[in-house]
Amino acid sequence: MSNPVLERADFNVAAGSSGVMTLRGTVNKSAILLILTIIGAAYTWSAARGGYSTAGMGYATVGAIAGFILAMVTCFKQEWSPITAPIYALCEGLFVGGISAMYEARTGGITIQAVMLTFGTFAGMLFLFQGNILRATPMFIKIVVAATVGIFLTYLLGMILSFFHINLSIFGGGQIGLIFSLVIVVVAALNLIIDFEFIQQSAASESAPKYMEWYSAFGLLVTVVWLYISILRVLSILNGGGNNR
């Protein structure tokens, strides 16, 4: 799996007496996490008053740090996901709300566009998956994994170089930056296909423990947030607000 969260999942653990993972249960848990993320985002957005503010970015920073820690804990302690996943969603909401407010301050009106495009992309990829038009074949997975790892390493390199005041053009707001951002959107969207396949096969196995519904929903949320932030970045560049990272 290209999603590092779902890749670590151990679906061979005995289900025990608490029940087994189901597709319906995973969908319900995903909806709960999405609602919690929206609540967290709305809180930060309200604190920032829909624009850049110290308070808003403060909440975003806390959410990013706490979310990262919770994500790591959830990856290594999957059985804790019924507790850690909802808290992670709230923290991720704080982060998303702050980032959204920052981009909105630069270019007004793009946040709602990014939200609509994210849900539209999600629905489109789900349609392609359910219609067997696009499936996670071994070759498909290899390509998406390679692209995802490449993006991660590029961001890591960019972060290291920034310490030496060296900025790569792909992180700027020009044509190269736009192309790179569009590639990230495509790769994030393709990761959804792998997530769908992984969840469907795991639920169909009827051997995954019940808590894996929360863990799978958590992994899917990671991809959706990545997709949203990437789309927000593209819209910002297209509207002339992407000159900064």
Image: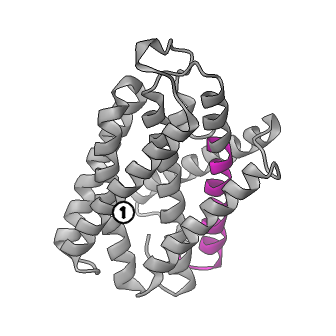
Q: Is residue 30 visible?
A: yes
Q: Residue at x 64, y 48 (%)?
A: 191
User: Which quadrant of the figure contains the N terminus?
Assistant: top right
Question: Which residues are drawn in magenta?
Answer: 172-195
Give the side of residue 113 with respect to residue 47, left or right. right
Residue occupying image coordinates x 27% and y 72%? 45
Give the secondary structure at mark 1.
helix
Decide: few, some or many residues near mark 1? Use Cα within 10 Å; few <14, some 14-19, many ≥20: many
The residue nearer to you, when weighing 173 against 234, is 234
The image quadrant that residue 173 belongs to is bottom right
Is 15 rendered above or below residue 238?
above
Q: Residue 78 or 132: which is nearer the viewer?
A: 132
Q: Residue at x 53, y 64 (%)?
A: 230
Which percent across, then down, holds residue 15?
Answer: 49, 15
Identify the residue position indicated by label 1 in the image: 96
- How far across and how far down the image is residue 94, in percent? 28, 59
